[in-house]
């Protein structure tokens, strides 16, 4: 039996003037979107610095932001730089799985806790930061993401989480209970396809026992969502999960079809499930922390953190 998910170490919140590093562990970044994202960060009185290989492309593998070694070096250098208070991912895409094993986790642990933000493919790193560093991370907008640079709601919720996290302990939803009830646990999760593909790897969580699982995805047809959830069920990864919050399912087909799969695969677990919580790939995506104790109230459509995401 896997051990229950436990609370992790919370990094310190940011203050005006803090230096933040922008890295690209996965896919390549359009320069114009990067500049727009940097302007937003500067408007928050942050000092953003761009890692050397953020705008790189990896030859014929042009879906990667440079080589695996360069992407890993950028992240590690930023994390181990004592002048950097937070590391923000420029985008998701694909590639984190290729570079995560190249990181020196001992050196990163010695550097101490700091804020880490990203989503989508960055789920791989959220898991690794939890298992290797024991650190709370933020599943939030990418610094060069389309939604972040154009959506005031996404910007404001991330800004509040970074600077005044006590103001966003209650994370509201516009949706409804799929399975009613309340549950307590420690938050974990991310992009469903990445959680499924990360199973059995050295840095993945062993399971969701005792946790509040937050999942979402983009561009996956209902049968593929079925396949990934079935894989998590068959491996026992979902055994003992306390509750489930569902985010966005953008470009995954008609929501009725997606919802039918979610009800079929998750509705029989006997735990509260709330849908449309507002995090993930949708417009105005909210920032949610992983590694924090919380209560999920499916009837109210709300996740309430026991303490702020950051100290």
Image: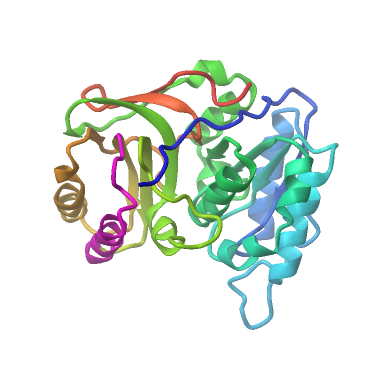
Q: Is residue 269 left or right of residue 209?
A: left
The furthest residue to the top: 167
Nearest the camera: 44 or 140?
140
State the image coordinates of residue 178 (x, y, percent, origin top left). Answer: 18, 37
Magenta segment boundaries in residue numbering: 222-242
Q: Residue at image x 51%, y 30%?
A: 7
Residue 311, compared with residue 85, is above or below; it is: above
State the image coordinates of residue 1 (x, y, percent, origin top left). Answer: 35, 47
Q: Can you tell which quarter of the image residue 114 is in?
A: top right
Q: Can you tell which quarter of the image residue 68 is in?
A: bottom right
The furthest residue to the bottom: 60
State the image coordinates of residue 271 (x, y, percent, origin top left). Answer: 21, 35
Nearest the camera: 244 or 133?
133
Nearest the camera: 308 or 38?
308
Q: Is residue 138 left or right of residue 274?
A: right
Q: Is 1 colored magenta in this rendering? A: no
Q: Kindly report the secondary structure that dominates the magenta region of the rendered protein.
A: helix
Q: Residue at image x 37%, y 44%?
A: 208
């Amino acid at each position: 039996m896997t051990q229950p998910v436990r609370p992790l170490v919370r990094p310190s919140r940011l203050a005006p003037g803090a230096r933040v590093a922008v890295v690209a562990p996965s896919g390549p970044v359009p320069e114009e979107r990067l500049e727009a994202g940097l302007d937003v960060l500067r408007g928050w009185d942050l000092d953003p610095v761009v890692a050397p290989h953020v705008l790189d492309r990896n030859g014929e593998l042009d879906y990667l932001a440079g080589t695996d070694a360069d992407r890993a070096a950028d992240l590690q250098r930023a994390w181990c730089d004592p002048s950097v208070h937070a590391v923000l991912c420029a985008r998701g895409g694909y590639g984190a799985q290729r570079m995560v094993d190249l990181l020196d986790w001992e050196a990163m642990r010695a550097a101490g806790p700091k804020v880490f933000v990203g989503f989508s493919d960055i789920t791989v790193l959220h898991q690794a930061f939890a298992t290797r560093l024991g650190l709370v991370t933020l599943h939030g907008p990418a610094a060069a993401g389309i939604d972040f640079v154009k959506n005031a709601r996404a910007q404001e919720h991330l800004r509040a989480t970074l600077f005044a996290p006590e103001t966003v302990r209650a994370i509201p939803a516009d949706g409804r209970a799929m399975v009613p009830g309340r549950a307590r646990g420690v938050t974990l999760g991310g992009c469903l396809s990445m959680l499924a593909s990360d199973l059995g790897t050295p840095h993945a969580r062993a399971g969701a026992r005792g946790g509040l699982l937050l999942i979402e995805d983009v561009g996956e047809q209902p049968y593929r969502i079925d396949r990934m959830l079935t894989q998590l069920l068959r491996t026992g990864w979902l055994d003992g999960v306390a509750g489930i919050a569902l985010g966005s399912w953008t470009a995954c087909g008609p929501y009725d079809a997606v919802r039918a799969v979610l009800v079929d695969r998750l509705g029989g677990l006997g735990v509260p499930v709330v849908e449309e919580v507002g995090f993930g790939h949708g417009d105005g995506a909210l920032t949610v922390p992983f590694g924090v104790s919380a209560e999920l109230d499916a009837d109210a459509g709300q996740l309430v953190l026991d303490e702020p995401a950051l100290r």
